[in-house]
Image (cartoon, grey):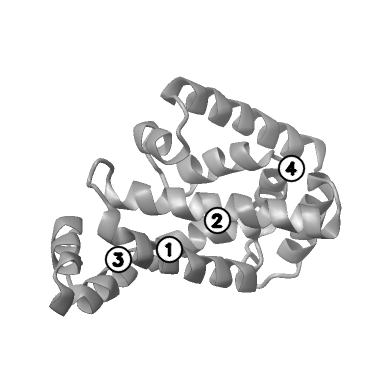
């Protein structure tokens, strides 16, 4: 297995016109899967997640020259991906002129028909429970539970205090437990 380039190396290569494409390919190799699954857990549908992930990397390509290193590269990219997910879900709500609850039911239907989330009954219950959370809470839960992201990094991505994120995660866990226990 090839050793992944570190972020500094990628950024350095990106700044040089001759190695920019190589740098972007290294960035894709290193982060495409993580970004895809971050997006996929929010929008559920593979095709939507694929489209959004492509949009995210187009934005990264366009904005990387202005990246100022005042954040970690991956938290900066997660912020772009997170914003794209929220924009997508809001557009979906408006386009269908439905409440977010209806969008969540639609996502739950997609989930149950998906072979990517085919896991056992408990895994399916967990995914259904996650879909009952408000968007921001779902993001916080996914970032902590699935991506094992530190609260400090989540704070950078979401622009929310660490304390608020901890409270949000705790509340999400309680809601998920409640959902799973009441839907047995």
Snapshot quadrant of residue 173: top right
Name which residue lies at 81% across and 42% down.
Answer: 183
SS of the residue under disc 4: loop
Select label 3 or label 1 by which is in front.
Answer: 1
Up-down relation of residue 39 to residue 115 (above or below): above
- The residue nearer to you, when weighing 55 against 172, is 55
Instruction: Pinpoint residue 172: horizontal percent, then vertical percent.
Output: 62, 33
Q: What residue is disc 2 on? A: 84
The quadrant of the picture occupied by the N terminus is: bottom left
The answer to whether the residues at label 3 and label 1 have Cβ atoms under 8 Å apart is: no
Residue at the spot of label 3: 30
Q: Earlier in the sequence, mark 1 or mark 4?
A: 1
Q: CA distance from mark 3 to mark 2?
A: 20 Å
Q: Are marks 2 and 1 in contact (CB under 8 Å)?
A: yes
In this view, the mark in front (3 or 2) = 2
Residue marked by disc 4: 132
Question: Residue under circle 1?
Answer: 59
Residue 61 place in picture, x, y as percent? 35, 67
């Amino acid at each position: 297995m090839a050793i992944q380039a570190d972020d500094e190396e990628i950024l350095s290569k990106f700044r040089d016109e001759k190695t920019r494409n190589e740098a972007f390919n290294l960035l894709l190799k290193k982060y495409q899967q993580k970004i895809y699954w971050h997006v996929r857990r929010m929008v559920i549908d593979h095709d939507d997640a694929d489209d959004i992930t492509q949009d995210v990397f187009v934005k990264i390509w366009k904005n990387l020259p202005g990246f100022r290193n005042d954040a970690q590269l991956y938290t900066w990219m997660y912020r772009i991906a997170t914003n794209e997910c929220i924009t997508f879900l809001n557009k979906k709500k408006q386009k269908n002129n439905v409440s977010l609850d209806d969008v969540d039911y639609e996502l739950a239907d997609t989930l149950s028909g998906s072979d990517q989330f085919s896991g056992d009954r408990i895994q399916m219950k967990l995914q259904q429970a996650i879909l009952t959370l408000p968007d921001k809470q779902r993001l916080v839960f996914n970032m902590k539970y699935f991506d094992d992201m530190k609260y400090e990094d989540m704070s950078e991505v979401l622009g929310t205090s660490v304390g608020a994120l901890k409270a949000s995660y705790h509340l999400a866990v309680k809601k998920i437990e409640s959902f799973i226990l009441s839907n047995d």
